[in-house]
Image (cartoon, helix red, strand yellow):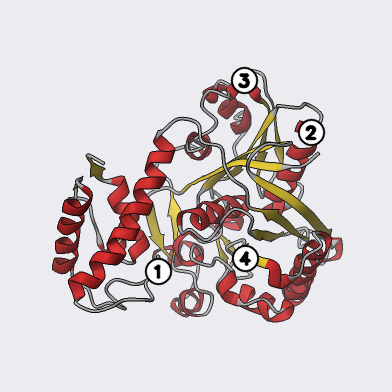
Amino acid sequence: MTTTLADVAAYLPERRVTVEDLGPSLGLTPTQVRVLRRFNGLGEVRRQRPGESLVDLLEAATRALPTLRGREHLVRYVLHARGVPVVAPYPVNPVHELKARLGLDNATAFAVTHHACASALLAIDLAGRLVGRDRGALALVVAGEQVFTQDERLAPDHRVFGEGAGACLVAADGPGDRLLSYVADQRGDLDHWGTDGLGAMERFAQEYTELLGDVVLTAVKQADLSVEDLTLVLPHNVNVVSWRRVCRRIGLPVDKVLLDNVPLAGHTPSADTFINHASAVALGRLAPGEVYLTAGAGFGAVFSAMVFERGVFEQHGSGHMATTELRTRVADTLTVLLGRLLGRDLPDLSEKTRLMDELGLSSSRTLELLLTLEDELDLQVDVEEIDRDDLASLGSLADFVVAHADGA
């Protein structure tokens, strides 16, 4: 039996809230806010609009799974991984409402909260064990929660919680990312809900780097690999500083850790794994055969890591495939056109290249670039909704073009 991620998707609400805007509601001083941004790399979080529910959040991520449609009858289990036991007032039951909305009539639904913010990894492992006894079956794992209490908005160890969701389909075989190892360690003496809450929290912070580093190294060893074999690490998005310390502890280059979402989304409890996976795929940082690791920690205190081998994903229908191919063409064409527009060779361009900060591209020159792109690819781009964030990098501009293109 092999646990396989057959499909992965994520969703972030459009509404952005900066740490400066969050500060007063969280009781933070201006200096504390500056620490969050400057030293911990936190910039903003996502929030749903008023009136949107947790089920809306989870449904948006699940609907983004291209291979679920038409295979709903194969889903035997729906697992909601979340950081806290209670995410909605009684008698609301988000995971059962989600199951009903999706038409998953044959599925058994339940929540997994035992490992706090690392519960997504536990849910993936549990889902694999369940479907392994029912060949051909699928399990749907969803992760995400709303932030409606003070504990869920700001943790004292420099985490700002955002709202986001992730989803994955787990199978016992077939195409997808193959699970090579899973390691979880729990230290009850560091549980901040115990009698010595403040002391336990302080010890948690002091031992955090070593404990998280240890589970990463153990997971790599159990997969019969070394740290050098890892192509990428998908972190939980607590802050930038903690991951730099873990990297020094285990000898991992920090550029192998996908930290792009820390300043853009904050920590989205158990959904970080899926959000970072989606980003890695969109950025072209995971290729078939490469090995990657995802890791996380949660109060309790739990530290977990999983190692996967990237596989080839099955495509159902032409829409998802067409979108993927279009984005590749857009990114490649932008790379060529930028050199032509700026009149010089640009050999080191990547998805992360900052168009304005690094290349000096102005807004007017960017519009010129888009017009030339339209001619090259025979499409039209609706530029009325473009904003400065869309112009931040080559990758963000490619995402905008794909989302607003007609005639491709």
Q: Which mark is residue 132?
A: 2
Q: Which residue is mark 4?
A: 231
Q: Which residue is mark 3?
A: 73
Question: In whole angstroms, how far apart are the C-alphas of marks 4 and 1?
Answer: 17 Å
Q: Position of residue 147 (x, y in %)?
A: 54, 50
Neighbour class for label 1 at 10 Å: few (<14), some, many (≥20)?
A: some
Report helix, strand or loop for mark 3.
helix
Foreground mark, 4 or 2, reads 4
Question: In whole angstroms, how far apart are the C-alphas of marks 4 and 2?
Answer: 28 Å
Question: In whole angstroms, how far apart are the C-alphas of marks 1 and 2?
Answer: 40 Å
Query: Which quadrant holds residue 255?
Result: bottom right
Foreground mark, 1 or 2, reads 1
Query: Which quadrant holds residue 123?
Result: top right
> Given the image, on which type of amino acid does mark 2 rest?
Gly
Q: Which residue is mark 1?
A: 350
- Please tell me whether residue 41 is drawn above or below residue 273 in the rendered image: below
Of the two numbered discs 3 and 1 on the same chain, state the one appearing first in sequence. Answer: 3
Of the two numbered discs 1 and 2 on the same chain, state the one appearing first in sequence. Answer: 2
Question: In whole angstroms, how far apart are the C-alphas of marks 3 and 2?
Answer: 17 Å
Of the two numbered discs 4 and 3 on the same chain, state the one appearing first in sequence. Answer: 3
Tell me whether the residue at label 4 lies in contact with that at label 2, contact meaning CB atoms closer than 8 angstroms.
no
Foreground mark, 4 or 3, reads 4
Report helix, strand or loop for mark 2.
loop
> Given the image, on which type of amino acid does mark 3 rest?
His
> Given the image, on which type of amino acid does mark 1 rest?
Ser
Question: In whole angstroms, how far apart are the C-alphas of marks 4 and 3?
Answer: 35 Å
Neighbour class for label 4 at 10 Å: few (<14), some, many (≥20)?
A: some
Residue at horizontal 45%, vertical 49%?
12
**Visible residue check, residue 86:** no
